[in-house]
Amino acid sequence: MNYRLCPSILSADFNRLGEQIQIMEKNGIEWLHIDVMDGDFVPCISFGMPVIRSIRKETRMFFDVHLMVTEPERYIRDFVDCGADSITVHAEACEDLERTIETIRDAGARAGVSIKPATPLNDISHLLSDVDMVLLMTVQPGFGGQKYMTECTEKIRELRKMLDEEGLDVDIQVDGGMNEQTIDIALEAGANLIVAGSGVFNGNIESNLRIMKQKLGRFYSEGD
């Protein structure tokens, strides 16, 4: 199982975005988490294809695109064309979730499905074998800087148990309130991909990356 830190550029300084991406690359970060919000599925609007296309020219990092948009199937091909390597859609936002996942695969990207804190795992349990990743939101989607919802920890454990029992090689990504205090909770519960926004970009980026990567590395060594 691969353990990775996936910094979310939602919390980056967009005046210095290229520079901050270079800092992450220099510090060995391989995945970049890109939150796209439409102002409909979630209240806020973030950014879209032009930003992704622009930064794609400057880095070879893996682009982990998280679509917090209504009817995301409308945009799958466009996001792949502008540089997405993986696309995660919300179960709550799709008219036909199974077909949307097929569309992602047909476009040549890794497929992920995400659910909000209140959405039960049973809503997606039937398609776990069809995805590469499940993203569990541990805050309400749409806003950065929120605190980790501790009641979500059991959901992480439950999902890891389901995947292990079915023998599925599916990543568990956790997004929301991840920092040097909460990362251990998510890892110990069974997550292996950690999205961090303000936990990386608030303060000294290199120092934050070093601390969180050390926690990931230590956990990997203990669990290997």
Image (cartoon, rainbow, N blue to C red):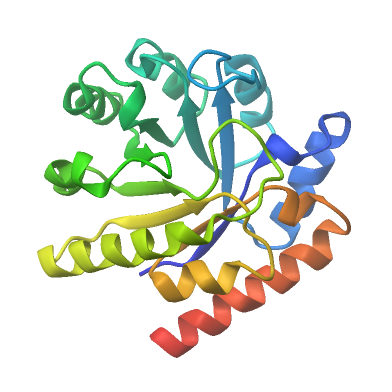
Q: Quadrant of residue 80?
A: top left
- Figure check: 153 above or below 102: below
| x then y, percent, for residue 26 | 75, 58
Q: Nearer the viewer, residue 208 or 106?
A: 208
| x then y, percent, for residue 202 | 83, 51
Q: Which quadrant is the N terminus positioned in?
A: bottom left
Question: Quick check: 122 left or right of 60?
Answer: left
The residue at the far bottom in this view is 222
Counting the numbered discs, the total is 0
Q: Which quadrant is the C terminus positioned in?
A: bottom left
Q: Nearer the viewer, residue 70 or 58?
A: 70
- Figure check: 182 above or below 54: below
- Figure check: 205 above or below 42: below
Q: Residue visible at 37% across and 57% down?
A: 172
Question: Quick check: 211 left or right of 127?
Answer: right
Q: Residue visible at 20% across and 19% down?
A: 96
| x then y, percent, for residue 216 | 56, 73
The residue at the far top in this view is 74
| x then y, percent, for residue 213 | 64, 70
Q: Residue visible at 33% across and 27% down?
A: 92
